[in-house]
Amino acid sequence: MTKITMREAISQALMEEMDRDPKVFIMGEEVGVWGGTYAVTKGFYDKYGAARVKDTPIAENAIIGGAIGAAMVGQRPIAELMTINFGFSAMDYIVNQAAKLHYMFGGQFTLPLVIRAVGGGGRQLGATHSQTPDAIFAHFPGLKVVSPGTPEDAKGLLKSAIRSNDPILFIEHATMYQVRGEVPEGEYTIPIGKSKVQRAGKDLTIVTYCKGLELSMKAADELAKEGIEVEVVDLRTLRPLDMEPIIESFKKTNRAVVVEEGWKSYGVGSEIVSRIYEEAFDYADAPIIRVAQKEVPLPYNRSLEQAALPQVADITAAVKEVLK
Amino acid sequence: MAETINMPKLGFDMAEGLLVRWVRQVGENINKGDVLAEIETDKATVEVESSASGVVLQLIVEQGTMVPVNAPIAVVGKVGEVISNQSSVSSDQSSVISDQSKVESRKSEVALNVERSTFNVQPASLEIGSVKASPLAKKIARDNNVNLASIQGTGPGGRVVRKDVEAALTSKQSSVISVQSAQTNYQLPITNYEDHILQTTKLRQAIGRRLVESKTTIPHFYVTHEFKMDALLDMRKQVNAYLPENEKVSVNDFILKGVALSLRQFPNLNATIKGNEVTQFGHVNVGVAVTVPGGLMTVVVKDTDQKTLRQISGEVKAMAARARDGKVKPDDVDGSTFSTSNLGMYDVEDFIAIINPPEAAILAISSAREVPVVENGQIKPGWRMKATISVDHRISDGAEAAQFMQALAGFLENPVRMLV
């Protein structure tokens, strides 16, 4: 195993799949000559040329709409949204077209489409460019939503996404491209729709994903110093949601905290908590607490931005509260 | 349509009641408001009235059964109304009833069951609703047949959580073991006076629970005052000369009136504390401790300060009689804002009482006795009575309690003030 960054992991996945299948191509703002806003596709333009690495106008509805059309006629497009916030401009294409075409045409078309989108706050990009609207997209049947928290998962899941014949929104976090992690040598994929226990423990279950995983693993380290052993379950895929490892873990620990970066109201955490109560009510020994972003537009000011985003200390405090 | 009669909730902290006696039997006619059964609660034996008219179709529980609040006890309906057999009373229910032997005998009775659509009897309604416990704790308790109500919760707000139930299960096992080993080592003493093990009554348990809570959570302090009783005793003699034998007023009736009027001046002693908040009650309802078989009960004279001596006297007599007969009404024992305890008839010089929570104070009244007193340098006989007030130091201080006792003296020593 070698340690590489999240950026390298995603880049490797894209390159391996483009080498493997000539139908795979990339389109988006500044993905070509510039090499991508987060330098994920650096060198791709030179290697694959303008036909497979397409720079587009600043028009998200055109990017997604065009990618949908390409997918319908048999190509395997990877459309990039520079930030997921721009996805709102293409909302109709994402949730009304991509998510529904297979159904609306009675299965005559499949849509092998991957939308890579950069989400999350913490880079002082202001309230309109720093959102974590994952729950909105995960709301729609027909659209798979994947959001990895480690380089290993990012690479394996992205490769599976590119090979899938379903439309998939692949959400990466803006502050996690430098995160390093071990990645298996050689070819591997990770199935979409499988949650994973990233850390074993017996006292409490933390359910989280993406940035929340990074924070939760740090919180788990700190709690371990105090003798509290938390189990961390990583969703990895928001839709289809795999509750099995979560329920299994909860039946063991009987207590849980759910961590997400988005807002608490109507969020991913609400869904998880509801399902735990529906499926394992008799195993609850304390109310489940959600850790999430403060309910404000994310401030630009660094101190305020950090105060509004969930932090490691929020998670450790929540864990102790649930363990009272 | 047939109607189920449920175990009533008499008092906010009542969780269950003992069905002592069925007054009506299956097949008998009953009108709404007629007495159907007698139940024993923490506080009293109370009559349960039927909430429906018709014929008693079914008595769901046997006499002597402990029944949770709101659990069905009987069915009243029209003659010939069909009650189909369905499992309205599942095995779940047995876990909430502490006495296993009673449960067994009850199960056959339970065979007559009730159609859900008609009676809306859900097994869940027999869960112990008032016990705060986590779902997991409830499940473990259910699986192991443990009564959650008997477990002290250590979770937030006293919630019973897994470890509490597990601890209870462990101690249950270990206590069984210790009893067995004690029996095997037992040797007869020379004279065989056997121990008597008495089952405490619900009343005794309630007294114990409340007073442990009072003595361990309320910082008591005490102020004793000696009252000159000559004028009051004279006045009582005069007043009683005009009253028939069964309406004569007692010394205690005067004291209740004096206490009530004094409390009007000292609202802090007619109060309760919760957290950082003291509630001074608008009503002055003085409670009177009455000795009853198996313990004591406090009957309450509502708005004591606004009633005449004769009203107070009449109410106390009636309520005390009901209390001694075990037929007290919920209203008789509810709502006191200050309590009194009088041991005057037992020739007691002085004693102190434990505050009756959630009240702020209690007055312990001793005997009026003829003693040598010094007045103007002369020793002469005089009637004196001591009383001691116990006060919650979180609410009041010694000076205020002492001033209250002086105010009370102002009434007891000038009893004419209590007649106007």
Image: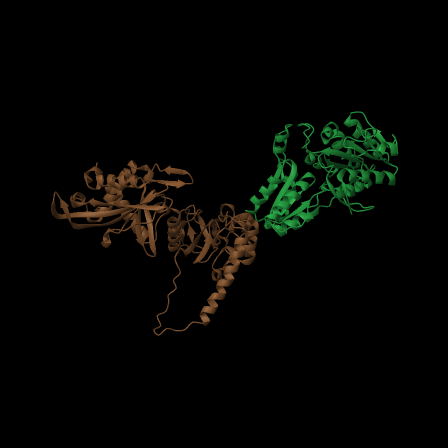
Chain colours: A green, B brown
Name the spot of residue A66 as percent of width and height, x first: 82, 29
- The quarter in which the C terminus of chain B is drawn is top left
Q: Please state which of residues A81 and B311 is positioned toward the viewer in this rendering.
A: A81
Q: Please state which of residues A303 and B214 is positioned toward the viewer in this rendering.
A: A303
Q: Residue at x 32, y 51 (%)?
A: B323
Res. B182 image quadrant: bottom left
Res. A31 image quadrant: top right
For residue A115, above or below residue B110: above
Q: Is residue B364 left or right of residue B196?
A: left
For the view shown, which residue lies furthest in the bottom direction? B190
For residue B248, above or below residue A88: below
Q: Is residue A161 left or right of residue A268?
A: right
Question: Can residue B90 be seen from the camera position used here?
Answer: no
Name the spot of residue B245 as percent of width and height, x first: 20, 49
Question: Can residue A67 be seen from the camera position used here?
Answer: yes
For the view shown, which residue lies furthest in the left direction? B378
Name the spot of residue B417 as percent of width and height, x first: 21, 37
Q: Is residue B249 left or right of residue A40?
A: left
Res. A109 image quadrant: top right
Name the spot of residue A167 as percent of width and height, x first: 78, 37
Q: Is residue A47 left or right of residue B315?
A: right
How many marks do you count on the picture?
0
Q: Please state which of residues B156 and B66 is positioned toward the viewer in this rendering.
A: B156
Q: Please state which of residues B34 and B214 is positioned toward the viewer in this rendering.
A: B214
